[in-house]
Amino acid sequence: MNIDDSKAGHNNGPSMATGVRFRKLCWNKARAELLPKLPIEVIRRRVKRARELGLDYKSYASIRATSGHDVVAFLFSSNALRLLKKNGRLPADRVAKLSALQRTGRLVAVNAPLTPDDMTSVATKDGIELNAVIRAPDMTHTWGQTRSLILTALDPAKLPADTVVAIGDTALEREWCAAGRLAGYVSAQSYFGALSG
């Protein structure tokens, strides 16, 4: 067994090479200069917008930084809305959150055995306006078919995919974000548990 003498006893501690501190200082300064310095008015507007969307500011800022756009609509799964059977009702917390949304489209992808008509009927009873309701992609759909189905929800309003955020409850629904090239994904637990005020 050969042991490399230069590595023997090395515990990956801080480098003892000359100039490390200076290089680290330069790196940190350059990185800080790259980060945007937003005026306080812009930050206040974005905090307000996050509240209108029912998102915590950290999630909203992350989605906005990744996509480069504001959130224009949410694509909810019927699972995320907890509508799991025919003739069911939306839970009160879901109704409250959907009703409180401002300047945001509400799209829904309905999982079988429910139909888009079932979802529309339930939403109407609760006084919630939905912009589009589609049948959700399932495990039998290819990646391309999943993409096509997701984009069908965006089509009536001609929404750019990178302005729509998926709110889902399963790993399959998380994949909608990548397949449809959406702005982001937020779990139902995180979204409906987030502070809206």
Image (cartoon, rainbow, N blue to C red):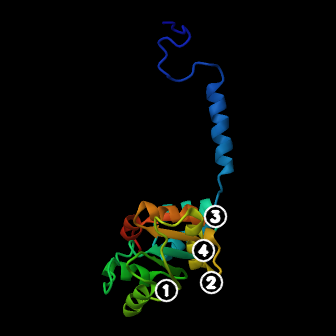
Mark closer to the observer (2, 4):
4
Q: Residue 130 carries which label?
A: 1
- Looking at the picture, which amino acid does disc 2 mark? Ala
Circle 3: is it few (<14), some (14-19), or many (20+) Cα within 10 Å? few
Relative side of 14 to 127, left or right: right
Q: Name the residue under label 3.
A: 39
Circle 2: is it few (<14), some (14-19), or many (20+) Cα within 10 Å? few
Mark closer to the observer (4, 3):
4
Expressed as whole percent of the image width and height from the top left, the position of residue 177 reads: 54, 64
**Picture quadrant of residue 72:** bottom right
Circle 4: is it few (<14), some (14-19), or many (20+) Cα within 10 Å? many
Residue placed most toward the observer, 84 or 112: 112
Q: Residue at x 51, y 6 (%)?
A: 2
Say whether disc 2 or disc 3 marks the residue closer to the N-terminus.
3
**Residues tagged 1 and 4 counted as in contact (Cβ below 8 A):** no
Q: Name the residue under label 4.
A: 151
Q: Distance between the residues labelled 4 and 3?
A: 35 Å
Q: Residue at x 62, y 68 (%)?
A: 162
Q: How far apart are marks 2 and 1 (CA)?
A: 12 Å
Q: Which mark is residue 157?
A: 2
Secondary structure under tag 3 reads loop
